[in-house]
Amino acid sequence: MLEQKRDFSMLSLYFAPHDEKVLTTKTFTSLFSVTHIFVIENAVKGRIRETECYWNLLSHAALTPDDLDRITQDGFSPFGMKLAETVYGSRKLIRFERSLLCRGDDARAERLLGSIGQLRNMNLEKALRELRARLSVYAGYHGKRDENFARQLEKLCTENFGKSILVIRGEAHQLALEKFLKRTAVPFTSFHPYEPWHPNLVTCMISKLQAGETPDQKETMTALATSIMCEEMEKNSKFPIPLESLVSTVESTLQGMTDADLESYLRIKLNNTAEIGEGRHSVPVPRQGSV
């Protein structure tokens, strides 16, 4: 089935969280093995040609992943290191997204998600409006990236006709990037680490907002409850909890709540959020663009 899809499209989009496990799935390894050009997500602009040069040296085994990690100014995340190990010696042509965002824009976008403790003096209705507004502005920042990235991919595909191109990108970008690509003449096929694929709710909300859609009241309440529960679990845990595991556990708990129970839970918690500290994850959405 995978090879049939490859025959259909020269451009493959692999939407996944920034978790090293997504680089070891059968879907990704199959796509990567046949691609000529591998395009990596990049959230902020600056020194992209230099970065591409280093990664292409890595691709031809002229640098090791450890060499590249030392060269990289901020150091690699676990996902970034696994990505470097995957590229090492693969002889793929490596390209990076040319983001429109400067580092300050990206930092401002991340701060919009802040700690849920910032909503403790709001009633439920105001807190929901504030959360939706923050997510909307956050999505706006990254929606601009997707529109610009679609044009970059159109140019890349035109200049490399007949070559297979694989893009790896955060799952929250899917609806917006697909929408913008459909305005071009470039055919594409989208993939996920597993099928069926179920991204977390906050990721779905941001994806909708980036595509110009509006999340409903239940989705926003569930996202707010997810944020509160995640922070409480982090506060009470003696050890760091991986983001994906944390969100998965919380969403499983919330699935058993009725709408009335969910509303009651939020009204109680919003009156007691002074007890909640600054969690390692605030609004639980994966970072969009870091390696």
Image: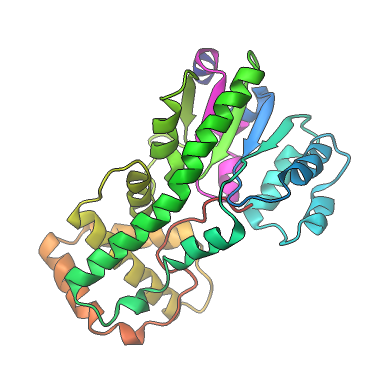
Which is more toward the observer, 119 or 284?
Answer: 119
Residue 50's spot in the image, x, y percent?
Answer: 78, 45
Residue 71's spot in the image, x, y percent?
Answer: 82, 56
> Residue sitting at 65 percent across and 58 percent down?
77
Q: Which residues are magenta?
A: 6-30
Residue 218's spot in the image, x, y percent?
Answer: 19, 56
Determine the image quadrant of residue 26. top right
Q: Is residue 250 visible?
A: yes
**Residue that extends furthest to the right in the rendered view of this protein:** 62
Is residue 163 found left or right of 151 in the rendered image?
right
Is residue 174 found left or right of 121 in the rendered image?
right
Q: How many marks?
A: 0
> Residue sitting at 22 percent across and 83 percent down?
271
Is residue 160 found left or right of 281 in the rendered image?
right
**Structure colour scheme:** rainbow
Residue 154's spot in the image, x, y percent?
Answer: 55, 25
Is residue 165 found left or right of 247 in the rendered image?
right
Which is more toward the observer, 39 or 29?
Answer: 39
In the rendered image of this protein, does residue 87 appear above or below residue 20? above
Task: Find out whether residue 16 is within the magenta segment.
Answer: yes
Determine the image quadrant of residue 35. top right
Q: Is residue 193 visible?
A: no
> Residue sitting at 73 percent across and 60 percent down?
75
> Residue sitting at 84 percent across and 39 percent down?
57
Task: Find out whether residue 237 is within the magenta segment.
Answer: no
**Residue that extends furthest to the left in the rendered view of this protein:** 260
Which is more toward the observer, 210 or 281?
Answer: 210
In the rendered image of this protein, does residue 48 appear above or below residue 150? below
In the rendered image of this protein, does residue 40 appear above or below residue 43? above
